[in-house]
Image (tube, helix red, strand yellow):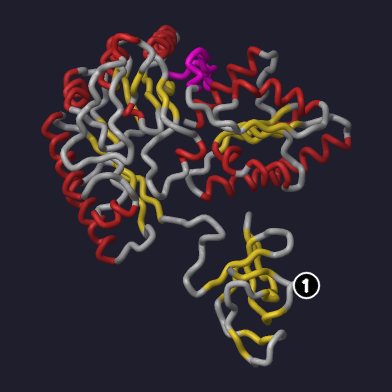
Amino acid sequence: MNVNDTEIAWAILQKNGYARTKELDEADVILLVTCSVREKAEQAIWNRLQHLKALKARRQQARLPLRIGILGCMAERLKEEILHREKLVDIVAGPDAYRDLPRLLAVAESGQQAANVLLSLDETYADILPVQTSAGGTTAFVSIMRGCDNMCSYCIVPFTRGRERSRPIASILQEVRMLSDQGVKEVTLLGQNVNSFRDMSEVQFQSAAAPVLSRGFSTVYKAKPGGLRFAHLLDQVSRIDPEMRIRFTSPHPKDFPDEVLQLIQERHNICKQLHLPAQSGSTRVLEAMRRGYTREAYLELVHHVRESIPGVRLSSDFIAGFCGETEEDHQQTLSLLREVRYNVGFLFAYSMRQPSKRSASELCGRNDGNIKVIFPDAEIEDAVGCKALVRAQPGDYVLVKVTSAGSQTLKGVPLCRTSLSRSAACH
């Protein structure tokens, strides 16, 4: 998805007179397209910015301005921190604000910081043909929808990329035909929840019935009637060029009606590989994740897929160590892996973002600068009352010696309970 976002941004900038350079030292503008799905992805951007800081300082000394921008999900999530940390970043643009890049860059030229992180209910960039970043390449990504409505409890996507909305099928087919004419041999249809595609642009299909979910699957939102669905799109795309492979990612297991499975089985150019993100093999954990299915329903879908598409290859996503997960839950996930025998698995250890990355034996407060401070819940000296040793309570002020710093929090050891003038308030 970030590759596709990059290509959309390039198309917009190219129309406004910007040209690409492969040499960092030649650039007048450096834009970083970012992800917020995992904390590690954000930390990589903070590290990259530190490298660019030195480059920007050298350019300023030579009176050659360099503008730095952060695009995408991290821009959406951390706009204020990005703009204020060391005043290094000049522009911030969320996933739905790429059309505004020329204006933002013009503002930045005057020496001001500029930002647009407004999310849209209808922006799909349907009229923009992305500029392929690898000229002459044989593969390409085609975005068919943006955003997500599933609201899985661990996922930030609905808040950084907004609500689900789909491109009109006509614009997708136009882009795929163009790619075919350019010699592209493999197209991947992209979306946060790609197979919930629903094109409402054609009036005659707006009253169509909502699809029926597979047995044992549910959603947090009401059924969405109307529109042309993913099976229709897949049918049309696969007819454009019989010699062009078609893939799609990333789907939700709830959105695999028989029409889609039958089409994949029938069309030789639709790859016989499906991504079925399970996330966990424990029904209890799946409920906590708000995935909308049980282990049994997921396995029933897997068996149905294999019956419908002989020889199908399956891949999946898994999160280990989710909040409240027990050893028994973990073993259920391992047994699901053994039973399904995926061809590929993307396995991640659950990582709570700071400052939530702490145990029940830790307390959290804020210092005068509104920075969170995490410290152990231990007995400390009482510099206010008459007790020799106390434990901090909500509303107390604690003097903390800071021992380490993260991107958004400080960690330390408590020294004593004190008065307002010197420390962070516990809560």
List x then y, in percent, for residue 204. Answer: 30, 9
Q: Is residue 61 among what the camera can see? A: yes
Q: What secondary structure is the stretch in magenta mostly built from?
A: loop
Place residue 21 in its image quadrant. top right
Give the quarter of the figure containing the C terminus: bottom right
The image quarter containing residue 62 is top right
Q: Is residue 284 left or right of residue 129?
A: left
Residue 425 in percent (x, y) is at 65, 69
Instruction: Answer with left or right where residue 192 lies relative to residue 296.
Output: right
Q: Is residue 242 visible?
A: no
Kind of residue at badge 1:
Ser
Q: Is residue 124 magenta?
A: yes
Mark 1 surroundings within 10 Å by alpha-carbon count, few (fewer than 14), some (14 through 19), many (20 or more): few
- Residues drawn in magenta: 123-139
Answer above or below: position of 190 versus 319.
above
* Extreme residue in the top direction: 181
Q: Is residue 348 above or below residue 105?
A: below
Q: Is residue 397 above or below residue 338?
A: below
The residue shown at (30%, 34%) is: 222
Residue 93 on image: x %, y %: 63, 31
Magenta residue check for 198:
no
Q: Residue at x 22, y 24 (%)?
A: 260
* Horizontal and vertical percent position of residue 221: 33, 37
**Which residue was labeled with disc 1?**
421
Q: Nearer the viewer, residue 314 or 382?
A: 382
At a point 46% along the width and 56% down the height, the residue shown is 351
Q: Secondary structure at mark 1?
A: loop
- The residue positioned 54% from the left and 22% from the top of the image is 7
